[in-house]
Amino acid sequence: MRSDLAVPLRLAGAYILFSLLWMLGGEYLLAPLVDKTYGDGTLHQLEDLLFVVLSTALIFVIIHRDRHSQRDLLDALSRNSRLLQQAQRNAALGSWEYVGSLHLSQEALRLFDQDAAHSHTSLDTLLTWLHPAERPAVQRAFRSLLDSCTPLSISARLYRPQATEDSWLMLRGEVDSSGQVLGTVQDISAQKRDEQALRDSEQRFRQLFERTPRIAVQGYDRERRVIYWNQASTQLYGYSLQDAMGKRLEELIVPPPQRGKVINAINTWLLGGPAISAGEIQLQRKDGRKVWVYSSHTMLRNSRNQLELYCVDIDLSEQKTIHGELQDSETRYRELVDTLSDVIVLTDAEAHLLFLNPAWEAISGYRMHESLGKQLPQFLVDEDAARLRAQLAELPGCTGSIRGEYRLLSRNGLQRRVELHLHRNPLNGSMRGSLCDIQERYQLQQLQHARNAVLDELLARRPVDRILDGISRRLQDLSPRMRVSIMLVTPDQTLHVAASPSLDERYREAIEGVPVAEGVGSCGHAAHSGELVIAEDLSTHPYWADYHELASACGLRACWSLPFKDDHGEVLGTFGIYYDSPSRPSSADIALVTEFTRLAGLAVQQTRSTPRPMD
């Protein structure tokens, strides 16, 4: 039924229904109200009057209700129209209709940048509003819509020569069931700019990785087939783009023993498990050679909401080679440092030891781990330690160096001459240098001095006791722990104390004239046997049974004796070396004393063969 006939027909129907009901029942309703005296004429007049009044009231009510409903509908339609217009403005959306020509809404005119005079326009005029490059496609799309009812959906640029940015419109249209052609136009400039920015970003992204020679990037689909392979991947793994596309990850670059593990890790990640962590891994080139890379991974979704795996690999071959060479260099350096006879020293600004090589243990007798953290002067004789501290304090700022000879006090209490070189680091004030053991060199120098002195004294024909006293003192200077005595064999086979600069007088008197015989102290037995005699502890040694109490009272706890002989092998005398604690001589001590016995033998032989000058 047509909507414009609904109200009249409803009104007519109500009137007919009311009339029929009144004709059938009106008299029965009025009869009780009218007196018989008025007659039938009065009843009919009253009936007609009420019919007119009631029917008029009925028509008024029906028309009033319809007008009220119509007003409500118009209000709702107006409100919806305003909401639609607001929504179109917010969405930059306009509408149009084609009825022989285009009928454009106000919002559509605004989008086309036209005034109200063009609300009715032709298709050809609309095409002139568009960019020339877009006109053919838009014209074809409209013809397809009008001729074959093909839905219209096309984007086009406005023709705005002076504008700095393009304005894009999306034109949509279709033919409805009644044959009307309706459509919309929408501003999609922001969307186009975003799409262009995304394309530019993707292009820059691709160019970034395409032009980065040392960063290999590969993309894989859910089946681990290659979908992206940059030039760096070709350089790293040896596969061209054509070789790699469509191939599986594990077939290309994963060594066979690792393939199962890699596949499981990727599948677990795809199913929502833990991601594959970045790290160093050894992969395989096309030629079978292994290559170390630092590989990181990410999972992305493409435009079809499908997961894709991307791997970013950095070639570590050169770093691995350099690292290996560095390790070899460090190993060689450490081997060199560990085998050096000189001590390598590193300290902080306050001379606390930070590094020592094994030569330290050989020279000082202290273990390296127990020495680190202590100050270097702690290991020197007090006098030399004070001198080194003073020199360190006098260094100017964070520069300068120290070089000199010092006496190192070893763990066993012996003094060793060392040469110390220290250079301060200007960056942090720390010091580095070396400590060289010059004890042997020092002894050789002193021995040479002793030889020269003995020769001078022999040339000057000094008394033998005076020469031997000088020899014993020089020996004691070289080894302060030693107390030296030199005894000479007399013709009656007893021993005469020729020199003993540091022995107690009581003890000297006691040993004067002891016989050269077996078991008589260290010197008596050595003079008798012609061999080295060592008494490590005088209180228990059998040769010292008659002397250990006196020796103990004089502070003597150990003694060893070394005889010296003439050119025919006859014993001329002995060197007696005493210590204030039980101990035995080192091979270096014996070698040192042996050199001095040669000087003593030379002095004794020369003085006995040459008459003494008259004083």
Image (spheres, helix red, strand yellow):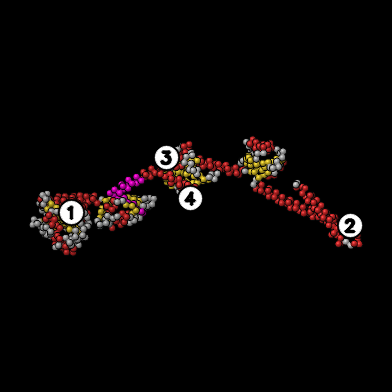
Q: Quadrant of residue 318?
A: top left
In magenta segment, residue 522? no
Mark 4 crowdedness (10 Å alpha carbons): few <14, some 14-19, many ≥20: few
Q: Nearer the viewer, mark 3 or mark 2?
A: 2
The image shows residue 429 at horizontal and vertical percentages of: 37, 52
Viewer can see residue 124: yes
Looking at numbered disc 2 in the image, what kind of residue is underneath it? Answer: Gln
The image shows residue 260 at horizontal and vertical percentages of: 43, 45
Q: CA distance from mark 3 to mark 4?
A: 29 Å
- Which residue matches tag 1? 471
**Marks 3 & 4, CB-CB < 8 Å contact:** no
The image shows residue 576 at horizontal and vertical percentages of: 16, 57
Q: What is the span of residues highlighted in magenta in the rendered image?
A: 327-349
- Which residue matches tag 4? 273
Q: Work out whether residue 497 or residue 274 is closer to the camera in this orientation and state it.
A: 274
Looking at numbered disc 4 in the image, what kind of residue is underneath it? Answer: Gly
Looking at numbered disc 3 in the image, what kind of residue is underneath it? Answer: Arg
Q: Nearer the viewer, mark 4 or mark 1?
A: 4
Element at badge 1?
helix
Q: CA distance from mark 4 to mark 1?
A: 88 Å
Q: Quadrant of residue 494?
A: bottom left
Q: CA distance from mark 2 to mark 1?
A: 178 Å
Viewer can see residue 169: no
Mark 2 crowdedness (10 Å alpha carbons): few <14, some 14-19, many ≥20: few
Element at badge 3?
loop
Point out the tag, 3 or 2, that comes first from the N-terminus. 2
Element at badge 4?
loop
